[in-house]
Amino acid sequence: MIGPFTLFGLFQREKLINSWDLVICASWLKSHDFNVLKYIENKLKYYIEEDERLSIGRLVTISQ
């Protein structure tokens, strides 16, 4: 089940220019779940341009 997020944020990486970490925290998330990562990736493809997606260096999911 998909529900609300506790945290959904982009954090700029300290030593890499134009590289961001997308950090997502929610009670319904399961850390290291491939299906969740694929779901988020598909949503990102729909809502943001390719060059913006390429600037995301890492996707971090945190289960609450």
Image (tube, rainbow, N blue to C red):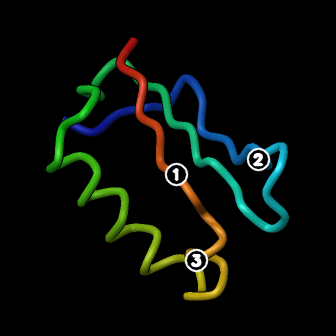
Q: Mark 2 touching mark 1, by CB under 8 A?
A: yes
Residue found 39% across the figure and 67% down from its top: 43
Residue 63 image-quadrant placement: top left
Residue found 84% across the figure and 64% down from its top: 17
In this rendering, the answer to whether 59 lies above or below 19 is: above
Identity, as a three-letter code, of the amino acid under mark 1:
Arg
Residue 27 image-quadrant placement: top left
- Where is residue 12? Give x, y as percent: 79, 49
Q: What distance separates the C-alpha of mark 2 from that of mark 3? A: 14 Å
Q: Mark 2 touching mark 3, by CB under 8 A?
A: no
Residue found 26% across the figure and 58% down from its top: 39
Identity, as a three-letter code, of the amino acid under mark 2:
Arg
Question: Which residue has dot 3 on it?
Answer: 54
Q: Which of marks 2 and 3 is nearer the N terminus?
A: 2
Q: What element carries label 1?
A: strand
* Drawn side of residue 32 relative to residue 47, left or right: left
- Where is residue 47? Give x, y as percent: 53, 76
Question: Which residue has dot 1 on it?
Answer: 58
Q: Is mark 3 on a helix, strand or loop?
A: helix
Considering depth in this image, is 3 or 15 the residue closer to the camera? 15
Identity, as a three-letter code, of the amino acid under mark 3:
Leu
Q: Mark 1 touching mark 3, by CB under 8 A?
A: no
Question: Which residue has dot 2 on it?
Answer: 13
In this rendering, the answer to whether 63 lies above or below 47 is: above
Q: What element carries label 2?
A: loop
